[in-house]
Image (cartoon, rainbow, N blue to C red):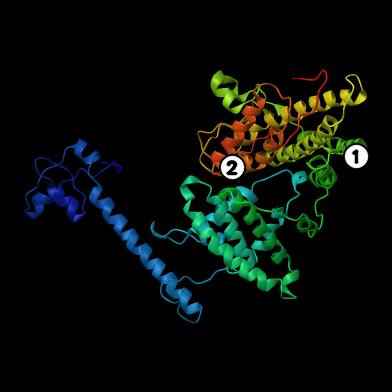
Amino acid sequence: MVYGGKPSAGCKNCRQRKIKCDERKPACTQCTNTGRVCPGYAHLFDLVLRDETESVSRKVQRGKRGGLKAVAEARRTAGQSSGGQQPRGTAPPTSNSAIATTASSGLFLPRSFQDPPEQQAVNSFFTTYILIPRHPYSRRGYLDCLLPLYQHTRHDSLLSLATTAIALAVQGASPRMRHYRDISPSYFGKALVKTSRAIRDPVESVKDETLMAILLLSFYEVEHCIQTSAPFGKISADLDSLRPNTFDNAASRLTSLSASVSDLLAFANPILRNRNEFPSREQLNTIIDYATKVESQLSTWPDCVIDEWWWKPSHTFDDLPSHERKLFVYNRRVDIYHDIWVASVWNSYRSAVLMIQYTVLQALGMLNLPPLSAEATRIVSSINKVQEIVDDICGTVPFNLGTKTFGGPSDRKEVRYPDDGTTKPSNDYRRSAAGLGGWFLAEPLKTAAHAISLREGQQEWILRQIERIQRIYTIKNPIENPTSSMPTPSCPGGRG
């Protein structure tokens, strides 16, 4: 029963004849003059709340028939304009730039017509990972160049196939979209075939689209190995050198400075981890001097960071019960950043600092040091530095993950994220945190988990956060014992 506005109170005969009824009683003038029996008048309550079910149903059916006719007419017109007929059961090929055009065309489609999973995955991939606003100084990855290249490619091009493969694989991490993973290998295989042809072609091999597709395929391999727990080798850093340094900002400077950390580890690890030969004192001192030089270079990076990049404390989760707050927050430390990418850049810096300090501690731990020597004091200083950096990384966990514990890379309304106390978290931030927060946080947390002499219970808390990330994104590989690969140095007077 619905209210359809002020109804006509005339008799049934006048309403059917669609003429004005004077509503005289006991019989209206129109029925009396024409010799008809006046049926009388309905109660006003029945008129106001009259049953409109049949009328509404008829209108809906007419609308559906009109919509189907519009679809058939559109297909017929498209067939005539293409100069031929499309085989039954197939759709005409379209370019990637037509995806947005179709959505805004205004053409009525029945509810049973849905986008194929490949298009849904690509749309979600761009919405979640590419099109989210970010601070311009945090741009340093090749995904920033993907959208301009993708818009001008055909649906069956190498870049389109590679994008579809990685989109299906990433979106397949969501529990409701596990079937996407079964589709992604076929697109990956097609992309590999086209890659083999492209790198042999003198024209295709030098195109930006080909390089971008290769980078995406390498990303797919890493993501696939993470999801399936398969081993994978080191991705060559030479791929990044093929892309010109387009962005001159704090993030790019950190990337350049971090290269010296990689050189340090490449030099020190074979010496420190050689179980057949104990390193000499001269080798250990060389490693310590090298690490000190790299640390000095890296310490200049925070000086180039603009003010809005520095984090601020938040008290968003103070209202949670103590036992629940401890699941998401360590030591009541909650920091908020400009966006997820800025937090990721800071954690990249912290991971680099931790790797330097770990190298120094390993080298110092192999020296027989007097308790009051300068080197023994350096151990205490390095351990304190490690504790400070690990606390900073733990402070980014609520900002990256909020209270999310499951559900894949999609935003969920019931998940809470920290704020500054004046404005609620924006939809862009929530979307980026749900899709990228865990991925950005996984490696810094694993690096922090290798720290020694942390506060009691902090390492266990970090491992639980890593398990939470694995549960959210359905990563299956087990967590290695972080203490097994990090020798503990003798620490005179240090934290126990």
Q: Is residue 484 above or below residue 326?
A: below
Residue 54: image location, x then y, percent:
23, 51
In the image, which disc is placed on residue 231? none
Q: Is residue 345 left or right of residue 334?
A: right
Nearer to us in this view, 336 or 113: 336
**Residue 133, picture quadrant:** top right
Residue 322, position as x, y percentages in the image: 56, 18
Is 377 left or right of 219, judged from the image as shown? right
Residue 111 seen anywhere in this rendered image of the structure: yes
Query: x, y percentage for residue 73?
Result: 41, 71
Q: Amino acid at mark 2?
A: Arg
Determine which of the numbered discs, if any, sits on residue 283 in the image. 1
Q: Secondary structure at mark 1?
A: helix
Where is mark 2, residue-wise? Answer: 431
Secondary structure beneath disc 2?
Answer: helix
Amino acid type indicated by mark 1: Gln
From what the image shows, is residue 159 above or below residue 289? below
Q: Which quarter of the figure has residue 149?
A: bottom right
Q: Residue furthest front?
A: 276
Q: Say if residue 104 shows up in the picture.
A: no
User: In the figure, 302 relative to 334: above or below?
Assistant: below
- Could you tell me which quadrant the C terminus lies in? top right
Eye-nearest disc, 1 or 2:
1
Q: Nearer the viewer, residue 2 or 245?
A: 245
Q: Earlier in the sequence, mark 1 or mark 2?
A: 1
420, 72: nearer the viewer: 420
